[in-house]
Image (cartoon, rainbow, N blue to C red):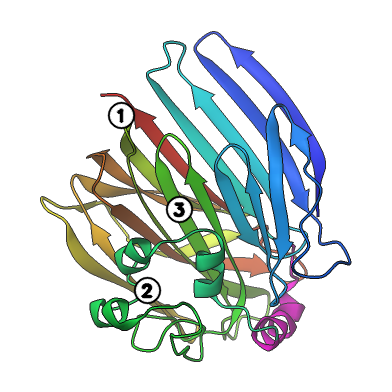
């Protein structure tokens, strides 16, 4: 079940803000049993269910659905302009910390449990259009697949055969969906690496986001965001610069290092994907103005972590919407 960790509510002259944190805690109950509803600042936990693989999927009354590992911390931040004509939502997952000397153990447990990134995506509400938009399925697979994920053969890294994937071992994954004024969805996958650095270890993180506007609302920004502890350094990242497009087109992104290749293929639409990178943070975001059109972004990076420390990884998705 889910229990409240902390919450705070702040009002300011130029915006209305609601921030809360919840911790996903799996109760010793059958996978089909849902948790009792919990409410914080008007947002209610509608259901919390344990997947057979051990992942937890929780749905909230504000339109957020989360699929993550047991013990992950989930935080919401919503903002609405005083005139009500624009707003934004930020949702984050802080996965349970995994020390560097236990990453291989975590990867083995992930595989043994039957976890997969596409399984997390489906549990959190990803649609068939989303799967295609994120490059998780080819057009042929979409046309021939009636049920997922059982009808889709999985390859060694937990993605459907024939799709772009990574060569490292997956040790964690998770997904977030915002389905409110607009729709924005993001998933992350974390990989072990091989290196010869005696003082540090390295992790590979890849995420993809997709979404569209709804009703009278335009989606104007959709972001996937990798944040780390201050002791962690982002050493490689892709895209390395802004990606502009005059029309929607599929683009592939590749980042290789430390014995791992991170690969992504997403539909890039006008106007562009922009990037921001600091020492311990890397994010990409789609910027434009759409209602019905599906747009997407992707982020890949390798991060250096001192031995004896955890990476402090925190995954955020963010959407900004407006009436004009």
Q: CA distance from mark 3 to mark 2?
A: 14 Å
Picture coordinates of residue 314, whole percent (x, y)? 62, 54
Instruction: Quickly name the residue at label 3.
Output: 185
In which quadrant is the C terminus drawn?
A: top left
**Numbered range of the magenta stretch:** 96-112
Q: Residues within 10 Å of mark 3 (few under 14, many from 20)?
A: many
Instruction: Quickly name the residue at label 2.
Output: 136
Q: CA distance from mark 1 to mark 3?
A: 19 Å
Q: Residues within 10 Å of mark 2 (few under 14, many from 20)?
A: many
N-terminal label among 3 and 2: 2
Can residue 305 be seen at all in this image of the molecule?
yes
In which quadrant is the N terminus drawn?
A: bottom right
Per the picture, the main secondary structure of the magenta-coloured stretch is: helix
What residue is drawn where x is 47% and y is 44%? 179
Q: Nearer the viewer, residue 238 or 129?
A: 129
Secondary structure beneath dot 1 equals loop
Q: Quadrant of residue 152?
A: bottom left
Q: Nearer the viewer, residue 247 or 53?
A: 53
Left/right placement of residue 20 relative to residue 220 reads right
What residue is drawn where x is 50% and y is 36%? 89
Observer-side mark, 1 or 3, equals 1
Left/right placement of residue 144 relative to residue 3 reads left
N-terminal label among 1 and 3: 3
What residue is drawn where x is 51% and y is 51%? 177
Mark 3 vs 2: CB contact within 8 A = no
């Amino acid at each position: 079940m889910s229990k409240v960790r902390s919450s705070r509510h702040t009002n300011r002259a130029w915006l209305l803000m609601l921030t809360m944190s919840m911790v996903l805690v799996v109760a010793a109950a059958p996978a089909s049993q849902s948790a009792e509803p919990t409410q914080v600042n008007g947002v209610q936990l509608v259901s919390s269910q344990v997947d057979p693989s051990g992942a937890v999927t929780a749905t909230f009354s504000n339109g957020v659905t989360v699929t993550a590992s047991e013990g992950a911390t989930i935080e919401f931040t919503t903002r609405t302009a005083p005139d009500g004509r624009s707003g934004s939502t930020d949702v984050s997952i802080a996965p349970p910390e995994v020390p560097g000397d236990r990453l291989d153990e975590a990867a083995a447990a992930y595989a043994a449990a039957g976890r997969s990134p596409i399984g997390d995506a489906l549990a959190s509400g990803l649609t068939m259009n989303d799967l295609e938009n994120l490059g998780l399925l080819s057009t042929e697979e979409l046309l021939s697949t009636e049920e997922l994920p059982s009808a889709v053969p999985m390859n060694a890294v937990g993605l459907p055969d024939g799709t772009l994937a990574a060569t490292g071992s997956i040790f964690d994954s998770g997904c977030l969906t915002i389905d409110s004024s607009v729709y924005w969805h993001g998933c992350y996958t974390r990989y072990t690496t091989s290196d010869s650095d005696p003082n540090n270890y390295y992790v590979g993180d890849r995420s993809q986001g997709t979404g569209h506007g709804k009703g009278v609302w335009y989606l104007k920004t959709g972001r996937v965001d990798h944040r780390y502890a201050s002791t962690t350094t982002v050493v490689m990242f892709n895209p390395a610069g802004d990606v502009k497009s005059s029309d929607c087109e599929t683009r592939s992104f590749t980042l290789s290092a430390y014995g791992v290749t991170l690969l992504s293929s997403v539909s890039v639409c006008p106007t562009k994907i922009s990037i921001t990178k600091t020492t311990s943070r890397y994010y990409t975001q789609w910027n434009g103005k759409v209602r019905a059109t599906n747009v997407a972004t992707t982020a890949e990076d390798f991060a250096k972590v001192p031995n004896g420390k955890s990476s402090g990884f925190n995954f955020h998705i963010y959407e900004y919407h407006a009436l004009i």
